[in-house]
Amino acid sequence: MTPVSTSKYNAESYNYLLRMLYLKKTLLAVLALSVLGVGVVSADEVIGPANGALSGHVQSLTAPLPQSMVYAYHLGDTSLRKVISDLEGNFRFDSLPAGLYKVIAFRNGFVPSIALLTRASAQAQQFLDLELQEDSATAPTDENSFWTVRDRIPSDVLRDIETAAAEAEIDVNNARLDQRFTPRNVETQMQAVAGMQEGLEVGNAQLAGGSVGIQGEVNDLYIGLTGNFVELQPGAKSETSAAISNGRTQLVSVQVESSDQSAVRVTSLSNRMVSPGSKSSNLSNIGLESHSVSWTQRVGDTGRSDFAVYYTEENNFYRQAPIEPLGIPDASRSWRIEGNYRAALTSRSNFETGVRYLDRQTEFFTPRRPVAGFATPLPTERIDVFGKAGLQVRPAILVEAGFLSSLRDGSLSAVSPTGGMVVSLGQNWRAHASGSYQVHNLQVDTMHQGFTPVLFEEHSNACGYSEEYCYQLLVSRKGKNFDQMSLGFTHRRFDETLHLYFNEDFFNRLESLYLVSGDEIPEVQFSASHQFTPMILATLRSNIAAGGGGILLAADRSRYENEVRYVVTSLDTQFRQTSTGVLLAFHHMAQQLTPVQQHQGRWRPRVAQPTLVELERLQVLLSQDLVIFSEAVADWAVQLNMEVSRGLPEAIPTVAEANDDLHKRITGGVAVKF
């Protein structure tokens, strides 16, 4: 469970839901709303067994580096702590007092990496990303060589490094444990939230909920239990309101991890919402349930295998007015089974391979002219086989290659090779270019084509989401401490329908767009993090995209030309001296559907008026750790979230009309950890 100072009340449940529904990649992570940046800037977001005062990741240019020694050297009292990275290169310190530290990572054959870290308090949670370069890749006179870097390493740390370099391999069974502090005690976290919401489907409603989490270690096992519950109840009804909704969302998750990095996780998620104002009883009930079991096992010294089973059942969740693409069901049930294996063959190479199977049945209860026997379930089976590999051909160049092939209902439907290159441009700069293109695409009947639901944060950072082709170029710079910058450009052309969600909240599911076959979307991404002072850290992230051109086939056989644009920007600032967080976020999205008809082999606009779906949202999120209770046994924090949005699809019958297109949401909460 995430404390209220860094997480929205039900962001964890909805984000996990969308990740499970994503058909191209296994992601079992929970997203904290208050941190929209990337990389090392997520100073307050550490999940599961990685929870600690300082967590991080050690890697080379090609792959994570397990068995790396990580030192935390206090420059004030010269105390020293040491941990060892696990199979994925992750490390953690469970207890670090306030002060100025040198954090040093080292592994045999690599040049040590050094970072300067300031801790405002012993309770602060921070994340650090450390990259090691091969010692053989640097000349003795290079400023990054071992002989130059060692001058900046404290003498007692240097002695330990030199001793370890001459000894045998380190025992990774103790990689997760701080050698001075063994976290055997049970930790409990509790959170309560309440507030009000006006707008979208919910009309005027009141929010209330809470969550509880218990985690600890028993012998060599980490055990974590998380429960989350939020309820939406009608507020004062207005005579002009068209709908007053009520609903609830609840999540239960259990995770067990052993000291050899094998883990089992069981999750059950249930979402329900009822809109009494809906004209159709079939459309008034919106629900989605997801249940999953996942297993991870270490294989050898550098290998890892993952296996997972998911079951999802939904009712009216994916339907969205005013115009819906053909093939969006009233209800569906699906099974997804997938497994993969990844390994670092050497310090210069890595690879991954896997397979996934999807079995989905869809049902249409509302009469639709193109569907004969509309109440008959339509089955869809799909098998994806994928693989990728990376090879460091030169010290500063990594070449990547891979493929994805899909079989749908027994026929080979798509084959997409991928390739890319990562180039180190000096000490701090890096360039990454990649691309994928379908060399084979079997046209599938629209009713069986289906669609891919995906959360915006995942879609904006990777190819592989229903594209015919996708090209990316990214240039990034990593400076000292938390300073970093990246500028990227992505161009996609889609061959299937994509439902892109911009809001993690189940109750605000309408904040989304459709991307259809034929759409071409260029997008610019920018992110920057800067530590202005040792106590102030700011992160800016922005995504801007505009495009379209695809033809949307609606349920009534009408056709529309699709045009979309969106701007997603956030500024996250952490004031460490006062343990205060301020998040400003702005979302703008628009989708215009222009009726078209075919004339002389080309699509031309009809006389009918285009349909415009447009929404803007401004959010301010404040979080505050209660430092006045710093001497207490428990850690306390409070949060205040304020949102204002404007604009809605006018044809949605369940939207309350009393809000005059201006919608507000205010929630507050308190969390305690002991």
Image (cartoon, helix red, strand yellow):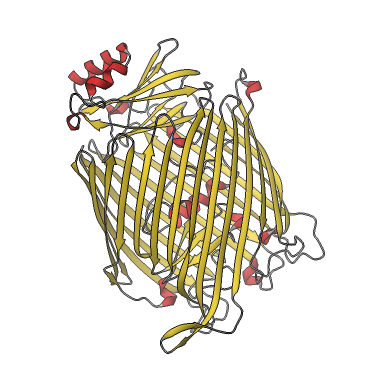
Q: Please, is residue 127 above or below residue 525 in the view?
A: above
Seen from this angle, which residue lies furthest bottom?
600
Q: Please, is residue 343 above or below residue 85 in the view?
A: below
- Frontmost residue, 84 versus 138: 138
Residue at the spot x=56%, y=76% of the render? 365
Q: Position of residue 205 (x, y in %)?
A: 73, 54
Q: Is residue 200 left or right of residue 468?
A: right
Kindly tell me whether residue 344 is visible in this rendering. yes
Q: Position of residue 312 (x, y in %)?
A: 47, 59
Residue at the spot x=58%, y=54% of the render? 587
- Frontmost residue, 339 versus 432: 432
- Could you say which quadrant of the image residue 450 lies in? bottom left
Kindly tell me whether residue 184 is visible in this rendering. no
Q: Is residue 671 left or right of residue 568?
A: right
Q: Position of residue 663 (x, y in %)?
A: 70, 56
Q: Please, is residue 105 above or below residue 293 in the view?
A: above
> Quarter holding the C terminus?
top right
Residue at the spot x=66%, y=73% of the render? 280
